[in-house]
Amino acid sequence: DQQVKQNSPSLSVQEGRISILNCDYTNSMFDYFLWYKKYPAEGPTFLISISSIKDKNEDGRFTVFLNKSAKHLSLHIVPSQPGDSAVYFCAAAGGTSYGKLTFGQGTILTVHP
Amino acid sequence: ETGVTQTPRHLVMGMTNKKSLKCEQHLGHNAMYWYKQSAKKPLELMFVYNFKEQTENNSVPSRFSPECPNSSHLFLHLHTLQPEDSALYLCASSPEEGGLYTIYFGEGSWLTVV
């Protein structure tokens, strides 16, 4: 039973346009969410996080939106750049330990010049 | 340069071998983690150590044996592994296990069991 789902295995976007990556979760105990980016042969790199007391968090070109009632979050990248091409993972935590992240399957983002 | 360093980056071992993966963090954190990423599967938590004490074993087979001698170092001892254990093993750290802290990952150790 997958508690964090990224239903789009891949996304292709033109440089300069917006990239929107989606993530759904089922566990109501999750109240802390993170996005990681991963290049081949490297470990995941932290991008941005959001706690359930907020519905939006912004950091430069990256914005994460949280819809608690729908158990849905999304990562917006504006404007997208070719260097953003990577695998993006959504992760969630909550309950007794915020160190125990549950990850989605990842979405491969390709940004075309 | 990552604050979490893993060695070796690549390891090929036979099913009867004994080997170890090493992780070192230079971030002053007190919590360390082992995660596993198998092909076409999400990253999966294996073990958590908080202030050198193991606080989580996510039903990991005993052929994987973690060791945390201090808050900066974490090992994963491997023995009599199976080919299906071939995966990317990621070490991570955070200030503590509790609280809304960011977890930082190392670059991973690619393990192939033959």
Image (spheres, coloured by chain):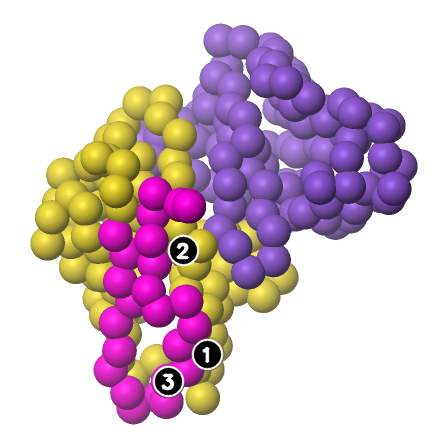
User: In the figure, B17 relative to A105: above or below?
Assistant: below
The structure residue drawn at horizontal position 37% and vertical position 85%, both measured from the top left corner, is: B13
Q: Residue furthest front?
A: B1
Depth check: give the residue in front, B103 or B58.
B103
Direction from residue B110 to residue B81 in the image, left or right: left
Q: Which chain is yellow?
A: B
- Write down the quadrant of residue A21 in the picture: top right
Image colour for chain A is purple
What residue do we see at 14% from left, 39% from top? B51
Residue A88 shows which numbered tag?
A: none
Q: Do discs 1 and 2 share a chain?
A: yes
Magenta stretch: residue B79 in it?
no
Local crowd size for mark 1, using a 10 Å CA cut-off: few (<14), some (14–19), many (≥20): some
- Quick check: A66 above or below A90? above
Q: Amino acid at mark 1?
A: Thr
Q: Secondary structure at mark 1?
A: strand
Residue A48 picture location, percent across and down: 54, 26
Label pair 1/2, CB-CB below 8 angstroms: no
Marking on residue B90: 2
Give the Cα distance between marks 1 and 2. Answer: 14 Å
Would you say the residues marked 3 and 1 are in contact, meaning their CB atoms lie under 8 Å apart? yes
Front in this rendered view, residue B44 or A34? A34
Inspect the magenta stretch and tell me whether residue B21 lies in it. Answer: yes
Above or below: residue A65 compared with residue B90: above
Give the residue at mark 1: B112
Q: Which residues are magenta?
A: B1-24
Please state which amino acid type lies under the numbered disc 3.
Met
- The image's mark for residue B13 is 3
Q: Residue at x 48, y 17 (%)?
A: A51
Q: Position of residue B56 (x, y in %)?
A: 25, 47
